[in-house]
Amino acid sequence: MVGPGRRGRLPHLVLAVVAITLFLLTYQWGSQYRHGTNDVPAVAGVRVLPARPLPETLAHPETGNEHLAGPPLTGTWTLMGFADDPQAPMARLVEIYNRLADRPDLRKRLQLVLVASTERGGSVRDFAQLAPAFHLVVGDTALARWRGALDSGDGDTPPALFLSDPDARLTTLFPAAQTPASIADDLRILMSERTR
């Protein structure tokens, strides 16, 4: 015959075993997620999951009108920045591209697009001449269309950068506070992930 003290311990013991088992299972799952055995590597930028297809007018703009419509966004990774005053996003795009100098394979698969309302200053006009990967899109209509497609807010919002994959799907947002060095590190991860 079991005494009243023993009966009270058995349910507590069962609950303790269940709690420990549950903890171990969730710990193992979390460890796999954090250490890259899943499909989504950790990056400092904000991942868009699932990746969001961009509008057809951005993915495949009219040919011969790149200065107003932009380059095609399919077949290559595209890092996009835009603002009413293009100096800040332009400087970030150039620095990010320069930080990828040790990875020419990634630079070949990346295009950088700056969308501005006007070509303020010679440096902005020269942006598209820096490298074949650099593209400048100018005009209030173009700026409004790109902002609307990416839900990026108005000119008062700090300029963020956006990354689309070779299928013209928005995959990542890089906030204004994220450094170019950190963005370049994220690009190494994201673009390498796609080739696996």
Image: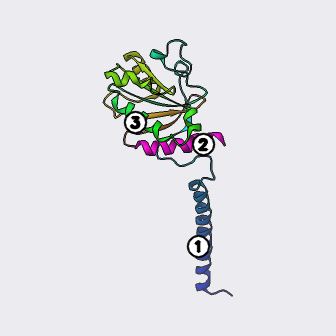
Going by the numbered disc 2, the residue's amino acid type is Ser
Q: The N terminus is located in which quarter?
A: bottom right
Q: In which image quadrant can residue 88 be found?
A: top left
Residue drawn at x 61%, y 27% as measured from the top left: 75
Q: Residues within 10 Å of mark 3 (few under 14, many from 20)?
A: some
Is residue 20 shown above or below 179? Answer: below
What span is colored magenta in the figure?
178-196
Q: Which residue position is annotated with label 1?
A: 16
Does label 1 or label 3 sit earlier along the sequence? 1
Specify the amino acid type for callout 1: Ala
Residue located beneath label 3 in the image: 92
Do labels 1 and 3 touch, CB within 8 Å? no
Q: Quadrant of the C terminus?
A: top right
Which of the pair 56/66 is nearer the observer?
66
Residue on which the image places disc 2: 192
Q: Of the residues tagged 1 and 3, which is closer to the observer?
A: 3
Query: Which-is-in-front pick, marks 2 and 1?
Result: 2
* Total numbered labels: 3
Q: Give the mark nearer the N terminus: 2 vs 1.
A: 1
Which residue sits at x=58%, y=80%? 8
Give the Cα separation between the discs numbered 2 and 1. Answer: 44 Å
Q: CA distance from mark 2 to mark 3?
A: 21 Å
For badge 3, the amino acid type reads: Arg
